[in-house]
Amino acid sequence: MRDGLKVIIQFQLPDGTYCCRGFEGAGFATPALVVVLAVGQGTQAAQTAERELVAAVISLSGQPEHLGMPCRGSIATPLRCHAHEVRSCHKLLVVIGDQHTPIAYSGIIAEWDTKRRSDDSYQILPVFPLGSQVDQLLPLELRGLNACFYQDVKQHIIPCVLARSGITSEDYRVFISYKRDETSALADQLFGVLSAAGFDVFLDRYCLPAGVSFQEYLAQELADKSMLLVLESDGVVTSDWVKWEIDLAKKSKMGLIALHPAGAAMHPDIDPPRRRELNAAAPQDPRRIADALAQQVVLWVREVHNAALHKRRNELRQNLIGEAGIWGLSVDSSAPQGYVKLQSASVPRREYRIWLTSRLLQFDDFHYTDTECVANSSGTGLVMSSMPHVVKLRREKIEWLARCSGIRFSDEGQLIHTVAKIAGGTL
């Protein structure tokens, strides 16, 4: 988008126009336009969503709000925004309603839906208070959409908006580290609430297949997740396995958070800012925590998860650009699709389009690289992960996928070697 913008957030004002707020940040993979529209008595929730959404984007980008917007901060209708000219931009219309006012299929809602049906970069997210009868509130044309229900704006609406707009990942993954004979009840409780909140949760009691190499499988599962959740206890402090998991999480730049039940020991390898106190036991079972606190844990985990993914991808991006500069490569990191374009100095000059991911490589990375980064160009596609595939079978599948697609792959540990081959035009 223009002026280096990666995220534009638009909110309707009382006079019917829209306030436009912009943000930069290399950590955002693809640009996003988010429009928040209130219907009926949804105004208060929309105003809270504005504050919380802006705060979340600033926190993720690590940069202040962009000043000097191309539209001067105000626009008559979101459909005139220049972001609509960017094919790869995620365009999300958030419609926040109440429990009583039917949403009319007209104006910007109808126009946005028309675009959505022919262009998958357009999405609509209906939002209602918990307990609302959606079939009575949504127009017939939108009843196929899954709505977001909320009690708390920050906890329920903001994560949905960030994920559906592509600002954060829709794929939340967490690994729970604990001591079975000490915190199994708490681990089971958190497994349930996190799974219900859309997380892919690894808990060894449910997820560890029989007959596998224990350490190899755990290493792959940790690498495949975005953060480690440690349940502190006396046994955890002395566990070599937990120490190994914490060390691997730090080495892999994963998100890391420790939950500390009252009276439990504190792990010396976990810094105090990463620790959260669990001081509200469930009245029916002191081995578990109160339901409200469990929901707060979901919010903590989501925030750490999102920040970790952005940090990992941004560091990988900066390391790639820095190494390319050392080798004298031509670097273009402003592509709207979020990839980095490098051009070799060798003759003939070759162009490489590199898609970066903060997780282990998967099918979607190759598909995106082929369709968005390489299609209609003579460039060579490359996907680069922040970590290697350590399980042989997983790596063999990635090698097969690379051969079939013609897309190269690498990881951060091979970054210097990969850039050197690009510089020589031999990759």
Image (spheres, rainbow, N blue to C red):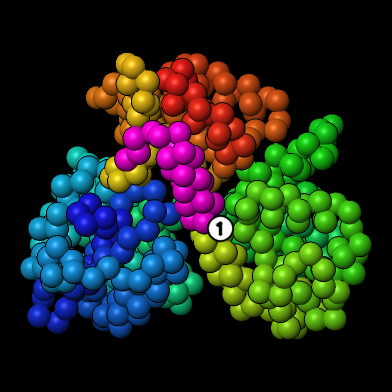
Residue 99: percent from left, percent from top: 32, 76
Question: With respect to residue 265, does 333 lie above or below?
Answer: above
Q: In the image shown, does 151 or 393 lie closer to the viewer? A: 393
Question: With respect to residue 211, does 43 lie above or below?
Answer: below
Where residue 5 sits, quadrant-wise, is bottom left
Question: Is residue 339 at all visible to an observer of this figure?
Answer: yes
Residue 356 lies left or right of residue 106; in this view the side is right
Disc 1 element: helix
Number of marks: 1
Instruction: Give the residue at mark 1.
Output: 308
The magenta region covers: 308-332
Residue 106 lies left or right of residue 300; in this view the side is left
Circle 1 packing at 10 Å, graded few (<14), some (14-19), many (20+), is many
Residue 331: percent from left, percent from top: 35, 38
Residue displayed at 37% across by 20% down: 346
The answer to whether residue 328 is magenta is: yes
Residue displayed at 26% across by 55% down: 4
Residue 236 lies left or right of residue 81; in this view the side is right
Q: In the image shown, does 138 or 279 lie closer to the viewer? A: 279
The answer to whether residue 69 is magenta is: no
Question: With respect to residue 265, does 24 lie above or below?
Answer: above
Residue 317: percent from left, percent from top: 46, 46
Residue 125: percent from left, percent from top: 32, 59
Check disc 1 and give the amino acid type: Ala
Q: In the image shown, does 159 or 292 lie closer to the viewer? A: 159
Residue displayed at 72% across by 78% down: 278
